[in-house]
């Protein structure tokens, strides 16, 4: 009977260690987007608490201050959860090895895991287990220390171009304002450097924001800025210049749109965000014809040349926007992005749960 009990304890302990080890490696080490069930559960439980707190926030500034703490608390919560699970796991194994009570088993587990060293097991198996527990505890802390510079380095790189775009397109960023300013300084036909810069930016975001998914929730230093609203304004500007503005064909703008919707879809896949996988040019989008006409009026007000065939220009704009429309506005809702036209201003209608099943939009 005691042997059966010890075997069960060993299996429980080893199983917990495997679960934690898998979560730690795929969260901190694996250089690709990987959905970790344990990480997702911790993130969603904490998010539910934040969603409850947001009900008491009366202004966006208050909501922004609340949500600014979400990603750091999730990171701390993951480490606490992993260590707590390891504490329980090694307690089970010490209980099986030493045959003592649970108090002694937890004491031995904590002493080993936190390298306190105030309790030494009497036999060789217990000593070996002590070493393994110490390595596991120190390993998690070491990986966390190595993880933080990586995530903050990626955050800093992302935010440089968020601020850069704000200087060109205003705050909140607007595609129309970018094109107006470019026309006023006689650079409307010479924006290839901008499209190339943000094509690379989208490529970096696709890599960092799927392999380091918490990075999506780290908010900009300025409350009115956000990487997702910047992404939307960049894509809309590229879509407008190749559909509505009469300034010739801009192949780099087209490549920027492709890089952008590829990045957003990859992030959307990680968060199970539904979007049409093969959208058609005539599919509906969240931008209305009236909103697009208003944008045209604003562009004409400063002398931006527009295409004469307004119907074809609208169809071409829809054909570009449909590639990123659903995933853009849904991500803006998921991230509680600050107000920005054509993205977060309509995101509440597309908001989905991060635990919701994948489904296609009609």
Image (cartoon, rainbow, N blue to C red):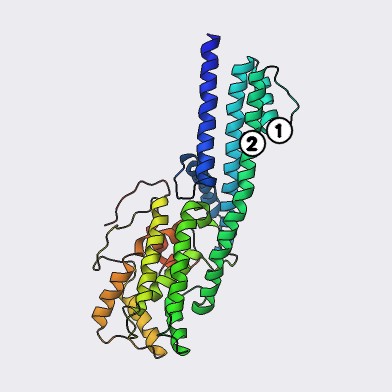
| Residue 72 rendering spot, x and y as whole percentages | 60, 51
| Residue 275 rendering spot, x and y as whole percentages | 33, 57
In the image, what residue occupies the spot 54% across and 78% down?
167
Q: Is residue 35 left or right of residue 28?
A: left
In the image, what residue occupies the spot 36% across and 85% down?
297
**SS for dot 1:** loop
- Residue in the foreground of this view, choosing between 339 and 93: 93
As drawn, 352 above or below 24:
below
| Residue 256 rendering spot, x and y as whole percentages | 39, 70
As drawn, 204 above or below 290:
above
Cβ atoms at labels 2 and 1 below 8 Å apart: yes
As drawn, 334 above or below 186:
above
| Residue 348 rendering spot, x and y as whole percentages | 41, 60
**SS for dot 2:** helix
Q: Which mark is residue 16?
A: none
Count of numbered circles in the view: 2
Q: Quadrant of residue 321 in the image?
A: bottom left
Q: Quadrant of residue 141 in the image?
A: top right
* Number of residues whose C-alpha sits closer than 10 Å to that of mark 2, classed few (under 14), some (14–19) or many (20 or more): some
Q: Is residue 191 left or right of residue 16?
A: left
According to the picture, the residue beneath numbered tag 1 turns out to be 115
In the image, what residue occupies the spot 45% across and 84% down?
182
Work out which quarter of the rendered image holds the C terminus and state it. Answer: bottom left
- Sequence-first tag of 2 and 1: 1
According to the picture, the residue beneath numbered tag 2 turns out to be 137
The answer to whether residue 246 is visible is yes
The answer to whether residue 106 is visible is no
Q: Marks 2/1: CA distance?
A: 8 Å
* Number of residues whose C-alpha sits closer than 10 Å to that of mark 1, classed few (under 14), some (14–19) or many (20 or more): some
């Amino acid at each position: 009977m005691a042997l059966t009990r010890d075997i069960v304890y060993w299996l429980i302990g080893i199983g917990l260690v495997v679960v934690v080890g898998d979560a730690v490696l795929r969260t901190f080490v694996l250089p690709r987007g990987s959905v970790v069930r344990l990480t997702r559960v911790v993130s969603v439980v904490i998010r539910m608490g934040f969603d409850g707190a947001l009900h008491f926030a009366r202004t966006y500034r208050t909501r922004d201050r609340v949500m600014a703490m979400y990603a750091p608390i999730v990171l701390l919560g993951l480490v606490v959860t992993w260590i707590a699970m390891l504490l329980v796991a090694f307690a089970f194994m010490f209980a099986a090895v030493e045959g003592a009570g649970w108090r002694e088993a937890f004491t031995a587990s904590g002493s080993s895991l936190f390298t306190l060293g105030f309790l030494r097991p009497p036999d060789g198996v217990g000593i070996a287990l002590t070493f393994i527990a110490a390595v596991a505890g120190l390993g998690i802390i070491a990986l966390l220390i190595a993880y933080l510079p990586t995530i903050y380095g990626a955050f800093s790189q992302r935010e440089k171009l968020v601020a850069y775009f704000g200087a060109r397109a205003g705050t909140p960023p607007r595609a129309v304002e970018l094109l107006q300013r470019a026309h006023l300084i006689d650079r409307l036909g010479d924006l290839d450097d901008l499209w190339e810069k943000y094509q690379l930016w989208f490529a970096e975001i696709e890599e960092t924001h799927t392999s380091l998914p918490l990075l999506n929730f780290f908010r900009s230093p300025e409350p009115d800025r956000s990487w997702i609203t910047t992404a939307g304004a960049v894509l809309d500007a590229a879509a407008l210049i190749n559909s509505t503005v009469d300034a010739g064909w801009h192949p780099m703008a087209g490549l920027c749109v492709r890089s952008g919707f590829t990045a957003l879809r990859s992030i959307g896949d990680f968060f199970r965000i539904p979007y049409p996988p093969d959208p058609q040019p005539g599919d509906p989008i969240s931008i209305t014809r009236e909103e697009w006409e208003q944008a045209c009026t604003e562009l004409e007000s400063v002398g931006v040349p527009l295409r004469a065939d307004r119907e074809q220009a609208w169809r071409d704009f829809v054909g570009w926007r449909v590639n990123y429309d659903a995933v853009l506005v849904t991500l803006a809702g998921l991230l509680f992005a600050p107000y920005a036209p054509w993205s977060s201003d309509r995101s509440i209608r597309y908001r989905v749960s991060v635990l919701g099943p994948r489904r296609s939009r009609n």
